[in-house]
Image (tube, rainbow, N blue to C red):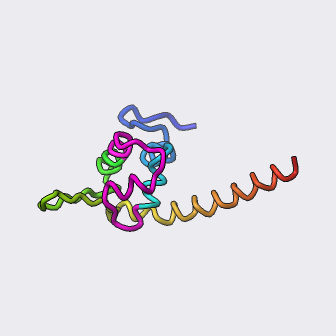
Amino acid sequence: MSQKDPGCLFNCAVEAAIEAIGGKWKGVILYHLAATRRFNELHRLLPGITQRMLTKQLRELERDGIVRRTVYAEVPPRVEYDITEFGKTLQPVMRELEQWGRQYLQKLAQNRGDG
């Protein structure tokens, strides 16, 4: 068992990754940002998320270098979100999570049928 580096915020790389993309909304936001999206478009794609929470999650993803926010000097102002080059390294992970999630949903459905 290794000791935690006193200068490190996380106990392991998995903990750091989960902190960056974990939670109820970040994974779904990243899934929908496979294409460039405007804020209101993202908001419509995520029923149940408040504007405040979407803003918070996007800011955290932007802070971590995963999402890029581009503001266009137009009237009215246009803001778009997309995945950074660093964020694109998550795409294989997100595809694997999607595949695992489908298998998990099938398993849940089978278990309900066995009940």
Q: From the viewer's perspective, is 111 left or right of 30? A: right
Q: Residue at x 28, y 58 (%)?
A: 68
Q: Report which quarter residue 104 is drawn in.
A: bottom right
Residue 40 is covered by the magenta coloring: yes
Q: Residue at x 31, y 59 (%)?
A: 38
Residue 66 is covered by the magenta coloring: no
Is the residue 26 above or below the residue 41 in the image? Answer: above
Q: Quadrant of the N terminus?
A: top right
Q: From the viewer's perspective, is 70 left or right of 7? A: left
Task: Name the spot of residue 53 as percent of width and height, x first.
Answer: 38, 41
Task: Name the spot of residue 6 as percent of width and height, x first.
Answer: 39, 31
- Return the residue nearer the eye: 61 or 28: 28
Q: Residue furthest right?
A: 114
Is the residue 59 above or below the residue 38 in the image? Answer: above
Number of numbered discs: 0
The residue range painted magenta reads: 33-57
Task: Name the spot of residue 23 as percent of width and height, x first.
Answer: 49, 43
- Return the residue nearer the eye: 1 or 35: 35
Q: Residue furthest top?
A: 6
Task: Name the spot of residue 107 as percent of width and height, x first.
Answer: 76, 55
Q: From the viewer's perspective, is 3 left or right of 51? A: right
Q: Residue at x 76, y 54 (%)?
A: 109
